[in-house]
Each structure stands twice: as C-alpha cells, then as structure tokens.
Image: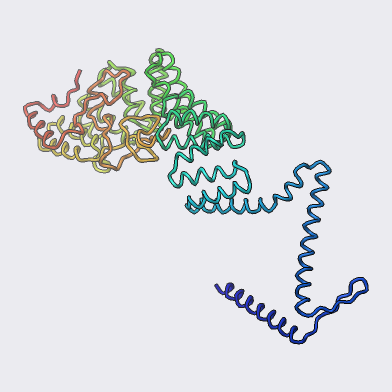
C-alpha cells in the first residue's frame, strides 16, 4: 500500500517537473543548434520536441529493419520459416498472453473466461494441442460434457495429444458410470503411456472390479517394473489378487489349489490365503503342512477362521483330543483374547467348565464382546448357575460390541467376510481385521456364534458363517429371555452339550 502511494506521488511529481521545464523552455524562446553536413539548424522548443520524437521513431524503425534483415539472411541460408517467425512474433506474444490468462481463469474456476481466452489464443497461435486442453477443461467446468467430449475426440487425431484425449474420455466415462467403456479406454491409455501412475491405478481398479484377476496381476507387475509400487507392497497385492483368482467358482480344483498356495507363498500373513492353502494341503494329503501354515499365521494374528481351518484337519476327533491338539496352536499366542476364548470353547465342549472359566479369565471385564459374554453364559449354565445369572450374561451379550471384523481402511466399512475389494469404495486390499466402533457394523458369525468349532465339528470347506449362532443379530432381548425361560426344564449339561 505504501509503495503504491510512493509510485503515484513520484509519477505526478515527474509530470509536473516535465511540464514546468517545457513551459520555462518555451518562455525563454531558445532552442538548440544542430549541425548536419556543415549546415546549422536552430529549431524552436516546439520544433525540438518534434525532432526528438522523430529521432526515437527513427531508432525504432532501424531496429525493426535490422531484425527483418537478419531474418532475410537466415531465410537465404536455408531457414524457410525465419521471415514468417519475424512477422508472427507479435502474434505469438498476444497468443501466449491469452493462453496464460486462460490457464489462470481455469485455475480460478472461471469457465467462461477460460473458454474465451483459449479461443483467442487459438486465433493467434493456431496450436490446438495447447488450446484444446484448456477448452475441454473449461467446458467440463461449465458442465458442458458434450463439448468437452468433442474436444477430447479432436485431440485423438494428433500423436502428441492422443494420450490426453484418451485420458479425458476415460475420466468422463468413469464419472458417467460406464465402466466397460472406461476399461477399454484405460487399456488404450496404458498402451500409450505404461509408466503413467494414475492410468495404472485406474486400470488396476477397473480390472479388479470386473474380476479380471489375471489382467490385474499383469497391471500390478507393470507398476512394479516402472517403479510405481514398492516390492513388498507388490507381493502383498499380488497375493490378494492370486487369492481372488483362487476363489473363482469357475476354476477346477487343481487351479484353485495352485493359486491358493501361490497366494500363501507371496503373503504368509494373509489369513484367507492361509486358510485356502491349508485346504489345498489337505487336498494333497498333507496334514502336517496344513497345520504348520495355520500355526504360523496364528502366531502373527489369531483369527477364528484359522481355528475353524485347524479343526477341519481332524474333523472326527473327540472334544478331549481336540483340546490336546489345539494346545500347540494356542501356545503361540497364549495371552491373546482370541486364544483364550478358543480354549474356553474347547473346554466347554469337553465339559470342563472350571478350566473354561480359568481360560476365559477377565476378558468379560476388559473386553466384553458378544462372543466373550456368550461363552461366559455357557460356563455359568454348565456349572449349574441360576437361570437369572445366565439370562443376565445373555442380555449383556445382545447389547455388547461385536468385536473384531474385516474393516476397510479407506471408508471404514465393516464386512461380513474378507474380500479383495471393499464393497463400498472398491479399494483393493483395504480390509483389515480390527475392532469395530459403529453400531451398524455387521455381526460376524465366527466372532459372535456360540462354540463355532464345537457345535459343528464336521468342518470342511464351508465358511464359518454357516455355524448356527446361539445369539443371532436379529433376535431381540425379549425373544432370548423367553427362549431361555422355556429351557428351564433342560438340565445344565444338556444346554451346553455339543451337537453331533
């Protein structure tokens, strides 16, 4: 502000000084003497001003003619565009000024102004590869998708702008929900610029959404090859895609087992891959490899699906034998809540209720999930507690938090089962097994069912949600209490006796 004021004052002072000097000169009536070729000229003050102006014009004209002469000499030496460039210099200056103004207008959100400046720049520059892009983005800013589409199609005719045109059309199709067309355009854009990271990500997402797992793995390999993804992340994502390919119902058993084993090799800590790999080992007749894979994964992250897969290795064993065999699994993470609840369930099946209470410990105090409270209700019933005590535990279980679930790290959506893609945001490999906080999160049968390994010992390749839960998510408090009251005539041992 102060600097602007100083400049204004200086300008007016300079004008006033020049006016005062010119007025004094004219009043004095004296000019200057100019000698040219022995002749003297003594113009008056007004004539002197005219001479100075003409002198400046003559100097400017000489500079321009000198530039034209240089351009002509270059033309004679073989530069065919030298003279045209000389004449177009002023036009280019105006064109680039309009282009810069259009870019600024586009960044400011002024679509109409950006469109006008782009048209002006095109008149001066005649370079559509520069101006059409601004025009297309300005049209999109104004909501004129038809005009933008037409401009993008014009860009397809030039090799230099073909990728820009394909990318623009691809994004338009994505916004319109035309995923099939967008996928074809993404493949074309990927062929034009395989190193373009945004195109890689869009193509990978569309291929995964369309369950083209082989194509997605190829794109993922290209991302690794061009340095767009770290090697460890590539192994994890490749394992997820291989696992998704293994889950394809159209595969034969051999292809499914091969893909499952490859997914487990790439990412041994991926729980669904471990489960499918254990089934593949069982299909190949190797119980030892199946047990080893599950124990290794349990040491990293205990999970009820791992326990179900471990039970499927020996589906016909007695409850006592199962307690003994599971000891090798539980000892890798003995203090984990999942290990303690699993051991309590196994001991309940073996009707060793005091040991089950000891194994459960204080979980119902520091982590009162629906599953933990339900297990406690079974222990109380098995030890012959009053019906009111059992009802109290069951009532708490209905309103308790549901425990861990597969939750998307991007949109925080909880899923009933693991999947390679989030069902809401379509993120690849975004599901993590962790505690949920939302009351609307789905209940995982494996986490809330009563005795998921015991009530259905004949576990094969079916997912754990088929286990019949003691407390269903759709059952309200009144129904549970009435059912429990109706069971008063049943002895405590019968209430917890495993089905066969």
Q: Is residue 27 left or right of residue 145?
A: right
Does residue 59 lie above or below 243 as drawn?
below
Q: Quadrant of the C terminus?
A: top left
- Residue at position x 48%, y 40% in the image: 148
Q: Indicate how the structure is coloured in the image.
A: rainbow
Q: Quadrant of residue 242?
A: top left
Measured as percent of width and height from the top left, residue 459 is found at 29, 19
- Residue at position x 62%, y 36% in the image: 160
Measured as percent of width and height from the top left, residue 130 is found at 59, 44
Which residue extends farthest right?
Answer: 38
- Residue at position x 59%, y 52% in the image: 98
Does residue 48 lie above or below 288 as drawn?
below
Q: Is residue 100 left or right of residue 139?
A: right
Does residue 297 lie above or below 259 as drawn?
below
Q: How many marks?
A: 0
Q: Quadrant of the N terminus?
A: bottom right
Q: Is residue 139 left or right of residue 313?
A: right
Nearer to me, 156 or 170: 156
Q: Quadrant of residue 78?
A: top right
Measured as percent of width and height from the top left, residue 111 is found at 48, 50
Q: Quadrant of residue 386?
A: top left
Measured as percent of width and height from the top left, residue 123 is found at 60, 47
């Amino acid at each position: 502000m102060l600097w602007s004021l100083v400049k204004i004052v200086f300008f007016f002072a300079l004008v006033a000084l020049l006016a005062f000097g010119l007025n004094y000169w004219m009043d004095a009536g004296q000019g200057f003497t100019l000698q040219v070729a022995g002749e003297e000229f003594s113009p008056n003050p007004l004539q002197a001003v005219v001479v100075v102006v003409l002198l400046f014009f003559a100097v400017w004209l000489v500079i321009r003619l000198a530039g034209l002469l240089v351009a002509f000499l270059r033309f004679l030496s073989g530069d065919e565009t030298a003279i045209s460039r000389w004449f177009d210099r002023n036009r280019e200056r105006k064109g680039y000024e309009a282009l810069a103004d259009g870019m600024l207008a586009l960044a400011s959100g002024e679509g109409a102004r950006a469109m006008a400046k782009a048209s002006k720049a095109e008149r001066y520059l005649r370079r559509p590869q520069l101006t059409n892009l601004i025009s297309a983005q300005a049209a999109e800013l104004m909501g004129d998708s038809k005009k933008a589409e037409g401009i993008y199609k014009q860009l397809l005719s030039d090799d230099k702008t073909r990728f820009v045109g394909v990318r623009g059309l691809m994004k338009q199709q994505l916004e319109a929900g035309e995923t099939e067309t967008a996928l074809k355009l993404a493949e074309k854009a990927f062929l034009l610029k395989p190193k373009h990271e945004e195109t890689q990500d869009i193509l990978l997402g569309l291929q995964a959404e369309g369950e083209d797992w082989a194509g997605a793995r190829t794109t993922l390999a290209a991302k690794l090859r061009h340095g767009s993804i770290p090697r460890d992340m590539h192994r994890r994502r490749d394992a997820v895609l291989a696992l998704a390919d293994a889950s394809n119902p159209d595969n034969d058993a051999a292809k499914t087992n091969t893909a499952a084993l490859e997914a487990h090799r790439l990412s041994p800590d991926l729980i669904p891959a471990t489960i499918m790999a254990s089934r593949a080992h069982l299909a190949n007749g190797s119980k030892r490899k199946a047990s080893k894979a599950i124990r290794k994964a349990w040491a990293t992250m205990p999970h009820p699906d791992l326990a179900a897969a471990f039970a499927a290795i020996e589906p016909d064993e007695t409850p006592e034998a199962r307690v003994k065999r599971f000891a090798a699994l539980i000892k890798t993470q003995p203090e984990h809540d999942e290990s303690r609840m699993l051991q309590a369930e196994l001991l309940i099946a073996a009707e060793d209720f005091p040991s089950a209470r000891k194994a459960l410990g204080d979980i119902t105090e520091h982590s009162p999930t629906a599953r933990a409270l339900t297990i406690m209700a079974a222990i109380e019933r098995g030890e012959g507690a009053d019906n009111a005590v059992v009802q109290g535990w069951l009532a708490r279980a209905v309103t308790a938090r549901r425990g861990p679930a597969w939750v998307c790290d991007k949109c925080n959506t909880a899923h009933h089962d693991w999947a390679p893609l989030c069902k809401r945001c379509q993120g690849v490999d975004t599901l993590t097994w962790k505690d949920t906080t939302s009351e609307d999160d789905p209940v995982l049968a494996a986490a809330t069912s009563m005795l998921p390994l015991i009530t259905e010992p004949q576990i094969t390749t079916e997912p754990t949600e088929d286990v019949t839960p003691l407390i269903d998510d759709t059952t309200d408090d009144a129904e549970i209490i009435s059912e429990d009251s109706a069971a008063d005539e049943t002895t405590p041992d019968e209430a917890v006796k495993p089905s066969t």
